[in-house]
Image (cartoon, rainbow, N blue to C red):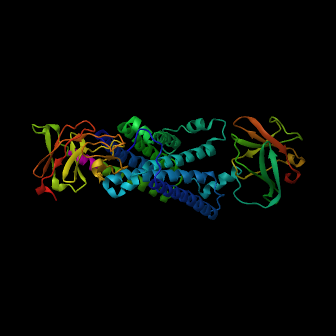
Amino acid sequence: MILERRQTHYFAAIAMAIVLPLLFAASLIWRPNYAMTSGAADELFARAGYVTETAESIASERIKLGVYTFTADAVQVSLSETAIELTSVFNLRIPDPLLYWAPGKDAPEALGDDAILLGGLSGRSRRRFVLPDEAKSGGQLVLFSQGSSTVIGAGPLPDSLKP
Amino acid sequence: MSVGYKSIQWTKTKLIYDVILIAAIALYVYLFITVSAKLGAEMNIPPVGNAVRIRAYGSAAFVLLHVILSIGPLCRLNDKFLPLLFNRRHMGVTMFVLASIHAAKTLNLYHAAGNLDPIVSLFVGNTEYFNLAAFPFETCGIVALLIFFMMAATSHDFWLTNLTAPIWKALHMGVYAAYALLVGHVTLGALQSHRDPLLTVAVGIGMVWVVGLHLAAALQEAKLDRQSLAVGDADATGFVETGVTVGDIVENRAKIVTISGERVAIFKYDGKIAAVSNVCQHQNGPLGEGKIVDGCITCPWHGYQYLPENGASPPPFTEKIPTFDVRLEGDRIFVKAIPHPAGTTVEPAQIPQSSVG
């Protein structure tokens, strides 16, 4: 290398020798003091509807909400309570997807005041939702994007999944 | 050597080098994903998804960058590592490809499902630039990737020839900034959320290794530069005493001296002494660390060749380097402080029979 490049390399090496260890040490000293994946987070995941423990499946269906296909299982979560567990077949590419139950036989094009929020969906993770009593008579499952404020798709609640 | 622009010249050595490189990367990614799946199954974590692939490609690029950055200083410290330097650019381009896969998969997984363009989402999703623990480390990675893109795009000899070696080399020194950014990307990213001491120690060792090697090589070079001879030291005829004697130089090899900050390679061959610029026209490699092969000074980096008498590459090649007048007084070697223009024929100094050996 010519002298100028050698000098650039010399100063670059010294700068790296000073800056990088400081950065490394600072990132360790000030790193958050909580574990991102410890068992303590399980309760938070459960509260958000993530399925953290398996339950016995009573019935299983494939349902389509718009163009999105889900595997839906009715599960017994306690002696008196059933729920449905939804897993998207493909990654959901929707901003902030939410699942609603809405009464009626026809797929709604917009959310009505009588729609009930069941919870959020994410990627391909398996999520558990407790259906309202009104769902015993049927109704629609509605996939709604909170990010784009639009109904993405809807489909009838199969008889086998009714609470 | 080259005759103007030429497409990539594949040789058996390059192919073997590339096959080993690709096989090693494929094995690394395969093992990373397989071991992650096995450990995940034992810990009841869902099957391998894109998150694991993102880590596999990202860590492969980071490890490969450490290898790439080690080659230069290792060659400065020990010439046994020179064969690794021969095809280093292919490693660099491969590393850029791995980093791009890592970035594309990250955008796809974490930023494609929102109501913003993924690139916009990447930059506005987190703006905690004044919070070290929550720092948007992705920005460091993207800026580093842009530097790697610039380097990969200009990696071909076409750009080297057109930009000239000093400018090309200056551009490619951006790799140090990119490395620093990537250390920030990893320490402010992965190390914040994964507290496994093994990962922390591995990143720390890698950083100490790369920085230590470059510092050692830089200090060694600076020491040589401090021994520079000045034009003002020249005698009335313009020659400076180099401090090198004929006996100091091994046959077909050279000793390097520094005159006014620039290095001169003094070669001994066939009973003669010739001096040329130490800077190869190709990538500014250190000619004085090469040897004379088939009558030509051969650069240790990529094998570019020059005739010692005139500093010109043998026909049909066109590269030329400056030459220096040489004078012997007994065993002592004197070199004229001012070089001749590149490609100028000079008469090598004849070694007296009494000094041979």
Q: Nearer the viewer, residue B34 or A25?
A: B34
Q: Nearer the viewer, residue B255 or B272?
A: B272
| Residue B278 visible in the shown view | yes
Residue A141 position, x and y percent, is 82, 44
Residue extent of the magenta highlight: B219-226
**Residue in view at x 64 percent, y 59 percent:** B45
Confirm whether the magenta stretch covers residue B23.
no
Quarter of the picture containing the C terminus of chain B is: bottom left
**Residue in view at x 62 percent, y 65 percent:** B42
Q: Is residue B205 toward the left or the right of residue A113 in the image?
A: left
Image quadrant assignment for residue B280: top left
Residue B245 position, x and y percent, is 15, 52
**Residue in view at x 22 percent, y 53 percent:** B269
**Residue in view at x 27 percent, y 39 percent:** B343
Q: Is residue A134 toward the left or the right of residue B112 in the image?
A: right
Residue B184 position, x and y percent, is 46, 45
Q: How many marks?
A: 0
Residue A35 position, x and y percent, is 55, 54
Q: Does B124 sit above or below residue B63? A: above
Q: Does B237 sit above or below residue B91? A: above
Q: Is residue B178 toward the left or the right of residue B296 in the image?
A: right
Quarter of the picture containing the N terminus of chain B is: top left
Give the dominant element type of the magenta stretch: helix, strand or loop. helix
Q: Nearer the viewer, residue B209 or B314?
A: B314
| Residue A30 visible in the shown view | no
Q: Which residue is the extreme one toward the front?
A: B315
Q: Is residue A60 toward the left or the right of residue B107 in the image?
A: right
